[in-house]
Amino acid sequence: MLRKLIHNQEGQSLVELVLVIPIFIFLLFGIIEFGRAWETLNIMTSAAREGARVAAVTNPNVSRASNAAQRILSAGNVSNASVSVTGPDGNGEVQVTVTVSYAPMSNIIPGLGPMSLSRSTSMHWEG
């Protein structure tokens, strides 16, 4: 009887599944959140570059540069972003900085709360 119980493995797969599924869910949501954050950073970088390009070829016109960056951000569905344009400085550089408060989709990953992401680009002013 004891030998039969030791070799009986009914339910083993279910126990293994219960132990492994939370790890898979954690990894899945981690990959999704990392991908979303990476995409947001790429959109912010493109917006900063576009804003710096416009600022470099104008007076620099702060409103035009900011609007150019905001167009890229809205096309990428990035909201609540702030764009700042500075320069030209003593070296003739204009700088555009894009800052976003990034909030994850879910709270399944502990410690991953709202965070501030920032990207900036500087270009030589052509004026």
Image: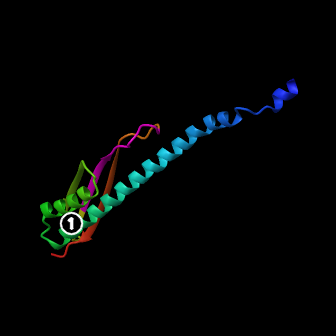
Residue 87: x and y, percent?
A: 19, 64
Kindly give the residue lying farthest to the bottom in the view shown.
126
Query: Which residue type carries mark 1?
Result: Asp
For the image, the number of numbered tags is 1
Q: Nearer the viewer, residue 21 or 105?
A: 21
Residue 121 horizontal side relative to residue 17, left or right: left
- Where disc 1 sits, the SS reads loop
Q: Looking at this view, name the residue that lies furthest to the top.
A: 1
**Above-or-below relation of 113 to 96:** above
- Seen in the picture, residue 35 relative to 18 is either above or below; the reply is below
* Rendered-image quadrant of the N terminus: top right
- Residue 103 lies within the magenta run: yes
Query: Is any atom of residue 63 visible in this view?
Result: yes
Determine the residue positioned at 24% across, 63% down: 95
Other residues around mark 1 within 10 Å, as few (<14) / some (14–19) / many (≥20): few
Residue holding disc 1: 89
Q: Is residue 65 above or below residue 77?
A: below
Image-quadrant location for residue 5: top right
Locate residue 83, reporting x and y percent.
Answer: 22, 55
Q: Is residue 94 visible?
A: no
Rendered image quadrant of residue 127: bottom left
In percent of width and height, residue 103 lies at 34, 43
Residue found at x 27% / y 61% = 47
Give the quadrant of residue 64.
Answer: bottom left
